[in-house]
Image (spheres, helix red, strand yellow):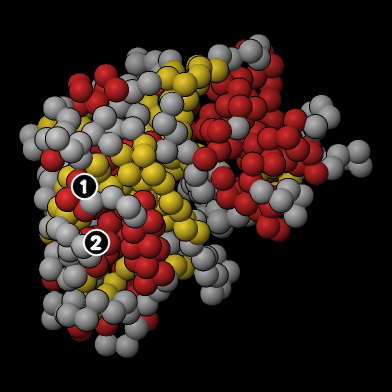
């Protein structure tokens, strides 16, 4: 008897990856294609939706090559969240490039809504803050800047979607326009308690309901595709960070994971009640599977792995991202050197879109190695910011351990420094592509390959644990310096 596979599509900010997992959730094949970034103006970042689609198609075909399509039980999709696509319902033609989650063009619109005193109401309803990070103001910008778009949207001629919805539409050849509740919880348009589109938020942001996708569970039916020589059901969808938390088996209240990709995203499971952070973090849906649902508090750092890309592409001090570990290891002790990589503003818990990056404390004897180490430290310090805010939101519940994943955690030096500066044990799993793994788990649950979350939790396997080695006093001193650097950048 043939054992089925699961195809996971992980569509990220800088690349599109397809991974094939077997029925035991073991990786069998992987193929990634880099995604071009477009910067039409200062603070603006766009992607070509058709390039995203073609890359997802090509990467999927690459991992399916030589295998029978009938052996693929399901497709699961994980995706960069908040990134906004608007397209014609009939033709599938995008009206505009996708506006990426990092894009800051709607900062003035968000500031105007804050000035009207609306942020508390928005946060209470959606769990989110008024920031250009989220989808709602991006949709409004497209409707206001593409001729005739708003009227067409009201007439039902246009579709809005985050990238999961766009891929589902393309995979089903336009038959299905749907999204899951985790992605919807990143739009500023979802009532977080009801997990349903909110009419008052739609009115506030000027988004016609006719253009919204149908909402489904994270593990459930999203149509089927016939583009690979046979029929494969699409049975899982989740935003990339929720998928990573699922792949990390963060199913119990207090479980926390941090993913280090282009940005850094830390989520802590808060149970089955919708949270509202008191510390400028975000309330979000972690997953919904039938009657089983979980929420999370999330902190978002806009620049993590992107600072390594900057060292490579802008400074030219490394040839590949993997070289940063060796370069940073050569650094001399450099007390007082701090790198604040606020290239596109500061995310949680500061939410300062106008902030810009700075390197502080440079002396004549410092060079590329010291800057590289400060860049990696900056990611750790920003994680400290998030964990401290999470701990305050969680009250008496202590965060004792941090599960990590993403490209940066292959770097042993980074993981050890993360443990040293956070004071937490850092657990690296055997499968670090947990975003794709989470998408596979969700699709596999719907396909009946996995019993439940307990079955998935039993499959989680530790590769290495990094224990803190730095004294508390040394850690506190370094963190105080970081907070002073942040204060200078914020002005």
Residue farthest toward the left in the current orientation of the protein: 291
- The quadrant of the rendering that contains the N terminus is top left
Local packing at callout 1 (Cα closer than 10 Å; few below 14, some 14-19, many 20+) is many
What residue lies at 69% left-to-right and 40% top-to-bottom? 324
Q: Give residue 93's quadrant in the image.
A: bottom left
Q: Position of residue 234 (x, y in %)?
A: 18, 52
What residue lies at 13% left-to-right and 40% top-to-bottom? 447
Residue 134 is left or right of residue 472, and the answer is left
Q: Compare residues 104 and 101 and report the one nearer the observer.
A: 101
**Label 1, on which residue?**
72
Q: Position of residue 468 (x, y in %)?
A: 58, 15
Q: Secondary structure at mark 2?
A: loop
149 in relation to 344, above or below = below
Local packing at callout 2 (Cα closer than 10 Å; few below 14, some 14-19, many 20+) is some
255 in relation to 174, above or below = above
**Label 2, on which residue?**
228
Q: Position of residue 75 (x, y in %)?
A: 23, 49
470 in relation to 351, above or below = above
What residue lies at 56% left-to-right and 21% top-to-bottom? 419
Residue 258 is left or right of residue 90, and the answer is right
Q: Position of residue 26 (x, y in %)?
A: 33, 32
Residue 116 is left or right of residue 172, and the answer is right
Residue farthest toward the right in the current orientation of the protein: 364
Residue 235 is left or right of residue 440, and the answer is left
Report how far apart the C-alphas of labels 2 and 1 lie in the structure: 10 Å
């Amino acid at each position: 008897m043939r054992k089925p596979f699961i195809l996971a599509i992980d569509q990220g900010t800088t690349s599109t990856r397809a991974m094939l997992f077997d029925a035991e959730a073991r990786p069998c094949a992987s193929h990634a294609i880099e995604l071009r970034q477009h910067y039409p103006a200062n603070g603006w970042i766009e992607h070509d939706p058709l390039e995203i689609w073609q890359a997802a198609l090509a990467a999927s075909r690459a991992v399916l090559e030589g295998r029978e399509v009938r052996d693929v039980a399901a497709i699961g999709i994980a995706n960069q969240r908040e990134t906004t696509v608007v397209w014609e319902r009939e033709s599938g033609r995008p009206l505009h490039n996708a506006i990426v989650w990092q894009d800051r063009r709607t900062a003035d619109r968000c500031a105007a809504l804050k000035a009207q005193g609306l942020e508390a109401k928005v946060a209470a309803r959606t769990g989110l803050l008024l920031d250009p990070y989220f989808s709602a103001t991006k949709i409004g910008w497209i409707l206001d800047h593409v001729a005739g778009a708003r009227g067409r949207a009201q007439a039902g001629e246009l579709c809005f979607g985050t990238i999961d919805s766009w891929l589902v539409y393309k995979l089903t050849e336009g038959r299905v326009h749907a999204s899951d509740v985790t992605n919807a919880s990143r739009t500023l348009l979802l009532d977080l308690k009801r997990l349903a589109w909110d009419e008052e938020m739609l009115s506030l942001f000027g988004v016609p309901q006719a253009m919204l996708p149908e909402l489904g569970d994270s593990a459930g039916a999203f149509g089927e595709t016939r583009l690979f020589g046979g029929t494969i059901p699409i049975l899982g969808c989740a935003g990339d960070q929720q998928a990573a938390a699922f792949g990390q088996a963060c199913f119990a209240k207090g479980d926390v994971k941090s993913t280090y990709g282009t940005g850094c995203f830390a989520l802590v499971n808060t149970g089955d009640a919708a949270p509202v952070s008191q510390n400028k973090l975000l309330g979000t849906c972690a997953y919904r599977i039938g009657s089983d649902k979980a929420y999370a508090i999330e902190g978002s750092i806009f620049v993590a792995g992107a600072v390594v890309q900057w060292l490579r592409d802008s400074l030219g001090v490394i040839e590949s991202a993997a070289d940063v570990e060796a370069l940073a290891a050569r650094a001399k002790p450099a007390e007082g050197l701090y790198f604040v990589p606020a290239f596109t503003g500061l995310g949680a818990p500061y939410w300062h879109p106008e902030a810009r990056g700075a390197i502080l404390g440079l002396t004549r004897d410092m060079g590329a190695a010291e800057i590289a180490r400060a860049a990696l430290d900056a990611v750790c310090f920003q994680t400290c910011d998030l964990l401290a805010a999470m701990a305050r939101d969680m009250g008496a519940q202590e965060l004792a351990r941090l599960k990590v994943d993403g490209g940066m955690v292959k770097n042993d030096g980074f993981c050890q420094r993360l443990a040293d500066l956070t004071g937490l044990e850092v657990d690296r799993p055997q499968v670090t592509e947990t975003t794709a793994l989470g998408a596979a788990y969700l699709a596999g649950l719907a396909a009946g390959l996995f019993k439940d979350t307990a079955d998935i939790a039993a499959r989680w396997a530790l590769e290495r644990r990094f224990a803190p080695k730095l004294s508390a006093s040394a850690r506190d001193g370094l963190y105080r310096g970081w907070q002073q650097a942040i204060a200078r950048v914020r002005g």
